[in-house]
Structures are given as structure tokens and as C-alpha cells.
Image (cartoon, grey):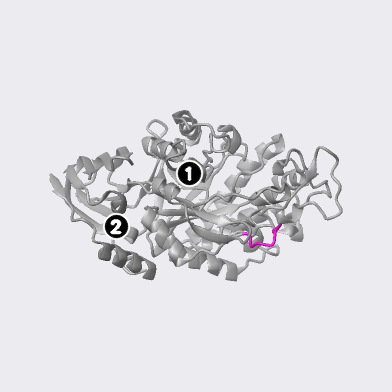
Amino acid sequence: MLRRFASLAPALVLAALLAACSGDGSDDSATALHFLHAEPDPVAGGRIVDGEGREVLLRGVNVNAYAEYWQGTEFPTTFPLTEEDAARMQAIGWNAVRLLLSWSRVEPEAGVYDEAYLDEIEGAVRLLERHGIYSILDLHQDAWNATLAARPDEECAPPTEPAIGWDGAPAWATFDGDRPRCTSAGVRETSPAVVAAFDAFWRDVPGPGDVGIRTRYARMLGHLAARFATDPAVAGYDLMNEPNAFTPSAQAGLPALYGEALAEIRAAEAAAGAPSHLVLFEPSGLWSALGQGAPPDFARDRDVVYAPHVYTGGFTGSPITRAAFQVARDEAVRFGGAPVLSGEWGADPRRAGPSGDGYFLDHQAFQDELRFSATLWTWRESCGDPHKVGDVRAGRVPYPWGEFDLDCSTNAVLGERTDLVDELTRAYPRAAPGRLVETRYDPAAGTLFVSGEQAGEGVELVVFYPGAKHGAPEVESSGLDDVESQETAGGGLLFTARASGGAWSLALAP
């Protein structure tokens, strides 16, 4: 079958964007969000699937608007998340946001949960849902928390230097033994205070009420799961961002934490009579730098997702290779062949565009080849973010990551990084009947080829295609009926079709 869809009239593109901003049309089946599950496979690689058995690829970005960071400059540490942001993400084609939460905000006092904060999180989930975007609730931490910055009068013996603060745990759960708050070569994890705080956590040192702080953390995740148990717009929970699990005691404590947290989450879901959500678990924070190092196994069920941060080459300027992804796939086999989702990836935005080296394009091509889900770091980074404080202290003008240029003398947003956004706006299958066999997109030619097998009759395929970039494509399909398209925010196209049963394929070309 060969068919060309009508060109996108500018007025219709504008209407689609306005509709997206108002939340209209979010009930359409192509953008409806479903409970997701994991289907492990140690041979072909695990998959994320929905209730119809469709293989789902989650592609999107990290949003830190609700994280509680240490403030080291005059500027706010984050920007708010707005309806305009969600509409722009939808126009890029994304269907997932890794939404950063801080334990310090969820549980500001031991055993006391801030429901007003969780109301804010629920508001963000609803905002994103209106644009067909899942939320992954990420319990974020960097170097334990915001309280472990060097004191104003703290002296650090050369070559160490005063530590800055970061984000994560509440002060009441911080047992740093009054150790020095100094870092070696600026590496935040080397601070003796951070090392001591994590060691206390892994050993489940008793805190307020004589309850272990690791136990409190797991219960906090259970409370979060109870709050969102019946919500299909929450894809799942990332148990802890880049845990500092570098010592033998940490390597014992990490699987204990994961098992305890998973048990708390599942108990909350069972009490609500709700399906299981995905639970994402990460290796230690060293994986981001080394590109390897699976955590020990833990007491788990099928609905877990291995979530290393595939930054290989992102910090060093080196090319990304398929080998980095294969390591993640191979490590996932240790957990029954769990599906893989790279919770963070990315590089200096200046590596995009005609003068760049293709890092962003290559990374996404490997995501397609191995059918990984992934969320980019990051959406909009403030000049006041702790990641930029080191530049300020060194007298350098910070260069925030993200999809927007900023003036770091004022923290004003100057506009979108069009080269980067162009490379991130790409065609891919969001939900594929049966098992996805291949997805191959050529951003220069605007062609997409997608194929699958073992599809049930009548099961719907959903594919995003960047019509604003390439125009309306010709369509060639097999094993599919009722191929249709609809416009979405910013001139994108969502193609839908119904599987005839068995093998199928779809090819789009300008």
C-alpha cells in the first residue's frame, strides 16, 4: 500500500499547537497512557509492554523543576515546568519525562510526608498526561543532600577544596559524623562527609524513633506508590539516582535497599487493588563514568527495569559506540533479561548541529537498534544549578545544558537551541503490536522503517513522525490495516494502524 498524506497547512499546525497547550484532544487513543509492565527476556532483550502486549519505547527528557537543590548563587536553582514546556516536548515527539523528586521534600520530618509537595507532583503528572507524556518518578540525589556543603569557616587541606551542596536526603537522615566537607579534584562523591552519610544509610543506622534511615527511605517509596497506585500516567519509580555504592558495605546495602523498596511499593499497590508499576533500579554512580558495573542482584519480580546512565563519551568528547549499549544489555541478563532504560544520557549541546560530531544522532540510533528507552539530561538547566557553581567559583561563565540558551549574567532564557532540538526530533514507534523487530530512522532523508512480529489481530500501532521537518510522507505497509495519521503539537504526525495478525511493517518516506 502506498499513500501520501496531505501537506501540513501552517494554520492547522498552529491550531494543533494551541489545542495541545489547552489540553484538548488528550483522550485520543493514540496518546492515551496505559499501565506499563516489563517482559524480561535474557536472549532477545527485555521489553516494556502495555496491557495489549504492545512493545512500548519511552523516549523523553529529565525535568528537575521539583528537585530541592542547594543554592550557591543568586539565581534560582531550577525553572518551573509549564504547559508550554509540555507542549514543546510533545512537538519534539517525546512520550516520557523522568521527573526528579527530592526525599527532603517528600519526607521533611521523619515519618511525616508533605502532601502539598506531592500535590505539586501530581499536578505535574496531570500536565504531562494532557500531552501524552508518561512520568517516571525519580528519587534523585547527588552527593547525598544539600546540607553537606562546606561550612563558611571550613578549611580544606590542599589539594582538597571546599565541597558545594547538592540534593537528596533530608537533614534528619544525615549522619556524616562531622567529617570534613572537602572534595578531591572537585569530585563530589569524595567528600568524607558524603562517604560517611552514605555508609550510615547502607548500614540502616537508626534515626528518629529508632527506625533505620534506609528503612525510612523504603517506606517513603511505599507512601509515594500508594499515592499514585491507580495512576497509569506514572510509568514507574526510579528507586535512587546514581547511588554512591562504592564500598563492600554499600554493595551489601544496595540490593537490600532495592528489595525492601520493591516490597514496600508492591504492598502499597496491592492494598489499592492496583496493577504493578515499573520499578527502575540503577547501578552505582560509577557507571556513568566507567560505562559498566552492574549492582548485585536482589529480591525482585518481573516488573523491574535496569536503568544505567549511558553517558559513555558524553563527558569526554569521545564518540558513542554500540559497545556501550551492549554492556547495558549484557548486564540486564543478570536480572532475568530485564528491559533497559537509560535514565540519563547526553553531552554538551554544542556537539549538535553542522559543526557538531553527531553524538546525539549516533546515541539515538543505537537506542533504536537495541530498542532501549531513554530520557535525556536535561530539559532546562538554570545558571544557579549546583552543576554550574564550580564554573562560577572558577571565574568561568557557566554553559548550562538543556534545550535552551541562557544568559548567565541574568539567568534569562534566550531561546531554543534549534540545532539540538532538531537532532532530538525524530521518528520512532511509541507502541508496537507484538514484538518490535526493527526501527530505523534516517534523519537526513526523513525515512522511517519499523517492523514487528507476533502481533495480535486488531492491535494498534502508534508511530511518531516529525512532519514539521519532513512534510507529509508516503506510506508503505504490510500486515497492517486502517493506516491513518493525525496532527499533533508543532506539526508532528501520529500514525496509527491495526495489525492483521503476525508479522507487519511500516515505511514512511517524504
Asked which quadrant contains residue 290, the reply is top right
Furthest residue in direction left, as rendered: 1
Which residues lie in the magenta part?
A: 71-77
Task: Determine the residue positioned at 50% across, 49% down.
Answer: 279
Rendering coords of residue 423 (x, y %):
40, 45
Give how far apart the Cα atoms at labels 2 and 1 are: 24 Å
Task: Determine the residue positioned at 34% across, 59% down.
Answer: 490
Say left or right for 398 vs 442. right
Which of the pair 434/144 is nearer the observer?
A: 144
Say left or right for 222 vs 42. right
2 or 1: tag closer to the N-terminus: 2
Which of the pair 192/311 is nearer the observer?
A: 311
Rendering coords of residue 285 (x, y %):
62, 40
Q: Secondary structure at mark 2?
A: loop
Q: Can residue 411 be seen in this snapshot? A: yes
Above or below residue 501? Residue 33 is below
According to the image, label 1 marks what residue? 305
Crowd rating for badge 1 (residues with CA inside 10 Å; few <14, some 14–19, many 20+)? many
Whether the magenta-drawn stretch holds residue 74 is answered as yes
Which of the pair 288/230 is nearer the observer?
A: 288
Task: Determine the residue positioned at 44% across, 60% down.
Answer: 274
Which of the pair 88/235 is nearer the observer?
A: 88
According to the image, label 2 marks what residue? 30
Q: Amino acid at mark 2?
A: Ala
Say left or right for 243 vs 455. right
Q: Secondary structure at mark 1?
A: strand
Asked which quadrant contains residue 116, the reply is bottom right
The C terminus: image quadrant: top left
Rendering coords of residue 44 (x, y %):
37, 32
